[in-house]
Image (cartoon, rainbow, N blue to C red):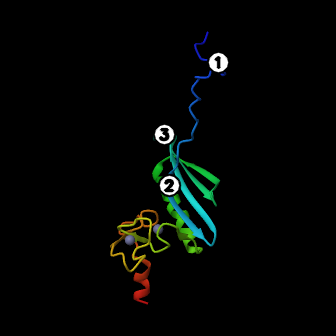
Amino acid sequence: MSDELPFYAPNKPPPPPRQPKPGEYLWTLTRGDQSRRAELRDAGGAAGAELQVFVNGEFASGRRYAARGLALADADGLRAVLELDGWICARCGGEYWVCETHRHRPAHHDDQCAGAGEPCPDCNRDDPPRPPRDFVSLVR
Ligand SMILES: [Zn+2]
Ligand SMILES: [Zn+2]
């Protein structure tokens, strides 16, 4: 016995869309027209967390970890390897720092913008943060 409306009932509400839990964005790296994006899907507790990598927007691989911290550490490691291979952070343009006012743009992206820089939240979460890339070129 069911009180569900038949499928042809005009007032039957559409079924709730079955949506996968959205991932937690970690970073995007680009090289030329290629991109790699990392997301974390944290199921919480004993279920652990999954690190997912997307290649040019398509899901490419996923790996499950017992704890969120392990997945994040591996995401950092993967990012470091890609950076050494010439990939750059899409958020800060590989500067490691972003504009404090426009947090999706590199620090000092424009002479008209006086926003002080702050460490890029995608690629510069170390403590202490890495210095901005120009900092290195100044002492060269
Ligand atoms: Zn700015
Ligand atoms: Zn960055």
Q: Is residue 62 above or below residue 7?
A: below
Q: Earlier in the sequence, mark 1 or mark 3?
A: 1
At 52% from the left and 64% from the top, the residue drawn is: 77
Residue at the image point whose x is 42% and y is 82% from the top = 134
Q: Check disc 1 and report the residue beneath it.
A: 6
Quadrant of ligand 1 in image: bottom left
First in sequence: mark 2 vs mark 1: 1
Instruction: Classify mark 3: residues with Cα within 10 Å, few (<14), some (14-19) or many (20+).
Output: few
Q: Nearer the viewer, mark 3 or mark 2?
A: 2
Q: Is residue 34 left or right of residue 132?
A: right
Where in the figure is residue 14, as x and y percent of width and height? Answer: 59, 29
Per the image, label 2 sits on a secondary structure element best described as strand
- Dividing the picture into quadrants, the one containing residue 33 is bottom right
Could you tell me residue 17's position as x and y percent? 58, 35
Helix, strand or loop under label 3: helix
Can you identify the residue that label 2 sits on? 25
Residue 128 point in image, percent of width and height = 35, 69
- Between the residue at mark 2 and the residue at mark 1, the CA separation in whole angstroms equals 40 Å
The residue nearer to you, when weighing 138 against 128, is: 138
Give SS at disc 1.
Answer: loop
- Classify the position of the N terminus by image quarter: top right
Q: Is residue 26 above or below residue 116?
A: above
* Circle on res. 46: 3
Question: On the rendered image, what quadrant is the C terminus found in?
Answer: bottom left
Ligand 2 within 8 Å, label 1 CB: no
At 40% from the left edge and 82% from the top edge, which residue is drawn? Answer: 135
Q: Label 1 vs label 3: CA separation?
A: 40 Å
Task: Please state the horizontal and vertical placement of residue 32, each as a whole percent of the image.
Answer: 62, 73
* Amino acid bearing label 2: Tyr
Of the residues shown, which amino acid type is indicated by label 3? Ala
